[in-house]
Image (cartoon, rainbow, N blue to C red):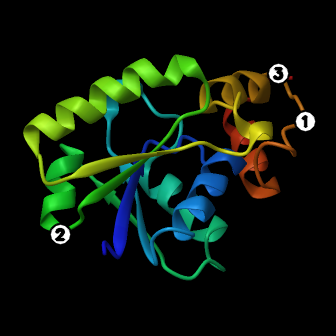
Amino acid sequence: MCQRALYPGSFDPVTYGHLDLIKRALLIFPELIVAVAHNTHKKPLFTVKERVAMLKRLTADLKGVIIDDFNGLVIDYARKHKIKVLIRGLRMISDFEYEFQMALTNRRLASEIETVFLMPQESYSYLSSKLLKEAASMGADLSSFVPPFIEKALKKKLFRP
């Protein structure tokens, strides 16, 4: 049985939806590496260092979670760390096509690595970092979407009264 999995993403910022998926993955795998991508194509709001720190703080009380970062292909990171399972979240049907395409591409490049799709709790199924950043820039209350320390960081970077 596979003992560890990898949950890669940009986590810009990490949300309660991400945390929900982390907890769900821990029900299946005793060890989960949550890896922050250096993907500069997305033009992240927070640096990799900031996103890693947010994830470490958010998951500090969860046994079996390791926070890391990576540059390059996720399958190269998985191979280097001897990980055979990637965790990906599916919120809405609109996520499926992109995630399915990515999973099949990863399978073609690394047939030994499987992708497992997890669905978040329904109350997080519409949540996206992009929408949160837009709401934060207008001063919205984000307390039901992110922890207070992340809301504060978002508003500090984005809110223009």
Label 1: which residue? 141
- Report the amino acid beneath label 1: Asp
Q: Dot 3, crowdedness within 10 Å: few (<14), some or many (≥20)?
A: some
- Residue for point 59% across, 53% down: 21
Residue labelled with disc 2: 82
Q: Position of residue 121 (x, y in %)?
A: 73, 45
Query: Which one is nearer the viewer's eye here, 155 or 35?
Result: 35
Which of labels 3 and 1 is toward the front? 1
In this view of the protein, can residue 159 be seen by the observer? Answer: no
**Residue 150 position in % (x across, y down):** 71, 51
Quadrant holding the N terminus: bottom left
Q: Quadrant of residue 126?
A: top right
Task: Say which of marks 1 and 2 sits in front.
Answer: 2
Mark number, residue 101: none
> Can the viewer see residue 20?
yes
Mark positioned earlier in the residue sequence (2 or 3): 2
The kind of residue on which mark 2 rests is Lys
- State the residue lying farthest toward the front: 1
Residue drawn at 17 percent across, 39 percent down: 107
Q: Nearer the viewer, residue 123 or 44?
A: 123
Horizontal arrangement in the rendering, residue 150 relative to residue 30 (left or right): right
| Mark 1 vs 2: CB contact within 8 A | no
Position of 11 compared to 133: left or right? left
**Local crowd size for mark 2, using a 10 Å CA cut-off: few (<14), some (14–19), many (≥20):** few
* Residue 138's disc number: 3
Q: Is residue 29 left or right of residue 134?
A: left
Separation of marks 2 and 3 at Cα, in angstroms: 43 Å
* Mark 1–mark 2 distance (CA, rounded to whole Å): 41 Å
SS type, badge 1: loop
Q: Position of residue 42 (x, y in %)?
A: 40, 26
Secondary structure beneath dot 2 equals loop
